[in-house]
Image: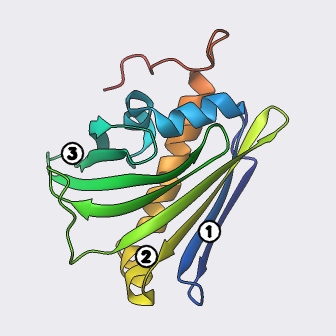
Amino acid sequence: MNKAILMNFVVDKDSKQIRVERQFDAPLPMVWAAWTQSELLDQWWAPKPWKARTKSLEFRLGGSWLYAMISPKGEEHWSKGDYKQIVPLGRFSVLDGFCDENGTINPDMPQSLWDNTFTEKGNSTLVTIVITYDQLADLEKIIDMGFKEGFTAGMENLDLYLSTNLTVENGIKPLIGHK
């Protein structure tokens, strides 16, 4: 597997959106699984040296993903995503926000709607992510918090995960020794 074939990160203040296009050198079912299964998300979602830990994930319409980003010192930052639309192996959207460990959304922090589209490109997969905010100030706050750098690092983690975890039977397997 090669490095990322494509990476675009565009902030559109007029539409209050962040648009990311990221191509991965892996088949669509494997990339889809990495985005939709908690045991796989936990292996790549957080930018190193942080780790992601899922408390619960119900990948279904009306379901949610409750997880923490954990710092090397053990500090936890919780987020919750509520699934709004799912088209298997094609697209899903999720309303995402910062919360407490019980999933209660923090009204003082921005929420965003993520629309994630997965497109097969031969043996690779293009993931297009459009993140929409209600207010420009919310988008700017997230950018100021280092979202671009953190999300880019997460995508690099996913590259590493995908490049070391191809299997013949189902296209995925847990990363050995990774917790």
**Is 136 displayed left or right of 79 in the figure?**
right
Q: Residue at x 55, y 45 (%)?
A: 156
Residue 143 - label: 2
Q: Please report whichever mark, 3 or 2, sits nearer to the chain's N-terminal start.
A: 3
**Residues under labels 2 and 1: Cα distance?**
13 Å
Instruction: Determine whether 154 is above or below 161 in the image.
Output: below
Q: Residue at x 43, y 82 (%)?
A: 134
> Which of the two discs, 3 and 1, sits closer to the camera?
1
**Is 73 displayed left or right of 97 in the figure?**
left
* Residue that label 1 marks: 19
- Name the image quarter holding residue 15: bottom right
The answer to whether mark 3 and mark 1 are in CB contact below 8 A is: no
* Residue that label 3 marks: 72
> Which of the two discs, 2 and 1, sits closer to the camera?
1
Residue 50 visible, this orientation = no
Q: Please report whichever mark, 2 or 1, sits nearer to the chain's N-terminal start.
A: 1
Dot 2 falls on a residue whose secondary structure is helix
